[in-house]
Image: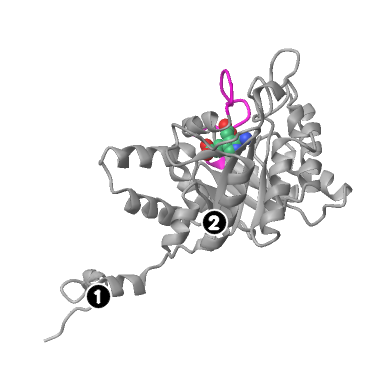
Amino acid sequence: MSTTYGTFPGARPRRLRTTPAMRRMVAETRLHPADLILPAFVREGAREPVPISAMPGVVQHTRDTLRKAAVEALAAGVSGIMLFGVPEDAKKDAVGTAGTDPDGILQVAIRDVKAEVGDDLVIMSDLCLDEYTDHGHCGVLDSEGRVDNDATLERYAEMAQVQADAGVHVVGPSGMMDGQVGVIRDALDQTGHEDVSVLAYTAKYASAFYGPFREAVGSSLQGDRKTYQQDPANARESLRELALDLAEGADMVMVKPALPYLDILAEVAKAVDVPVAAYQISGEYAMVEAAAANGWIDRDRAIMETLTGVKRAGANMILTYWATEVARQL
Ligand code: PBG
C-alpha cells in the first residue's frame, strides 16, 4: 500500500510542533539581546526619575539613573541606547536653541553615557527639534506658521555637529524634513565626524501611536505632523523615501511605528543592503501594558510575540522600551 507523503495523512505539520524542544529546533526566527536597542528619556534638572503615566514602567531619567539604565542595558546584552533629551520648559523656544547648546540636556546625557559605557554600547541620539521647540513641531516655522523645511535643515546640521562633538556613535534624524540625511552627513563630514553613522528614520508615519511619547518629552504640540510625516495609507511612498535616504548617505534605515507597518518593514528589508531597524513606539508599548494590566492578555507572551513578528518581518534591530527586560529573559 502506498502512502501519499506529500499530503494528509502522510503529511502532518503538527509533528514539528509536538514538544518545546522540537518547536525550538525548527524556529525560523530567534530574538537575540543584540537585536535590541533601548530608547531612553533624560530630563534636565530632575532629582528623581519622573514616571510617564501613559507608559507604565518607563521614566524620564535623571542624569544619574540614565547612566544606571545604560549599564543595566549593556549587562543584559542590549546593543544600543537611543537618547531623547527633555529640557526645562523655560529653555524651549521657537527655534529649539537647547537642541544645539553644547550643554543642552541631550549633549550632556551623551557625554554621561559615553563616560559610563564608552564604546561598549552603541550610543544613539534623536536628532529632531520637537523636544526643544515651544510650539512642539519638529522644525522651525515660517511667517505663516508652517514648518520651514530648508530653514530646519540648517538647525539639523548644527544639531548633528553638537551631538557628534558630545561623542555619539549614531545620530537618528526623526523629523522627516526633505534632504535631512544629506545635510546631516555633510555636516558630520565637514566637522571631522566621518565615523559617526546616520540611522535614517526612512519610513515614518503620522501615527496616533506616538501619543504617550508626547508626555514622555513634555511636548506641547498643537495640531499634527501630517505635512511632514507620511500618510498611513501610503506604501509606495516609503520606497521613494528609502531611495532618497540611501542616495543621501544613510548607513542604516528605520521603519516606524513597527506593528501597524510590518508590510512596509518587509518591503524595505527586501529592497536594501544596509541594516534595517524598526521602532516599536510608545503607543505600541502602552497598548500591551494597558491590556495586560487589565488582565486581558498575557503580558510576557504578547511582548515576545510582537518582537518576534517585527524581526520575522525583516528588522535587524528593534528599538523597544522593553529592551533590557526582554534581553534578560533571552
Ligand atoms: C520625534 C520623535 C517622535 C518619536 C521618536 N522621535 C515623536 C513624533 O514623531 O511625533 C516617537 C517615539 C515613540 O512614540 O515612542 N522627535
Q: Residue at x 62, y 25 (%)?
A: 227
User: Residue 16 placed where, x, y %?
Assistant: 27, 73
Which callout, 1 or 2, points at the residue further toward the start of the chain?
A: 1
Span of residues in magenta: 218-236
Image height check: is 201 above or below 134?
below
Magenta span includes 230:
yes
Taking the image in four quarters, ligand 1 sits in the one at: top right
- Regarding residue 41, the answer to whether it shows in the image is yes
**247 or 129: nearer the viewer:** 129
User: Residue 138 placed where, x, y %?
Assistant: 66, 29
- Regarding residue 237, the answer to whether it shows in the image is no
Image height check: is 286 above or below 278?
above
Magenta span includes 140:
no
Name the element at disc 1: loop
User: Residue 237 placed where, x, y %?
Assistant: 59, 39
Q: Residue at x 45, y 62 (%)?
A: 31
Instruction: Decide if residue 145 is on the left or right side of residue 316.
Output: right
> In the rendered view of the protein, which quadrant contains the N terminus?
bottom left
Residue at image mark 1? 6
Residue at image mark 2? 72
Specify the farthest residue to the left.
1
Q: Which residue is drawn at 49% across and 54% down?
A: 324
Amino acid at the residue labelled 1 = Gly
Specify the farthest residue to the top.
144
Q: Which residue is drawn at 80% across and 41% down?
A: 162
Q: Nearer the viewer, mark 1 or mark 2?
A: 2
Image height check: is 262 above or below 138?
below
For the rendered model, the colour scheme is: one colour
Name the element at disc 2: helix
**233 or 163: nearer the viewer:** 163
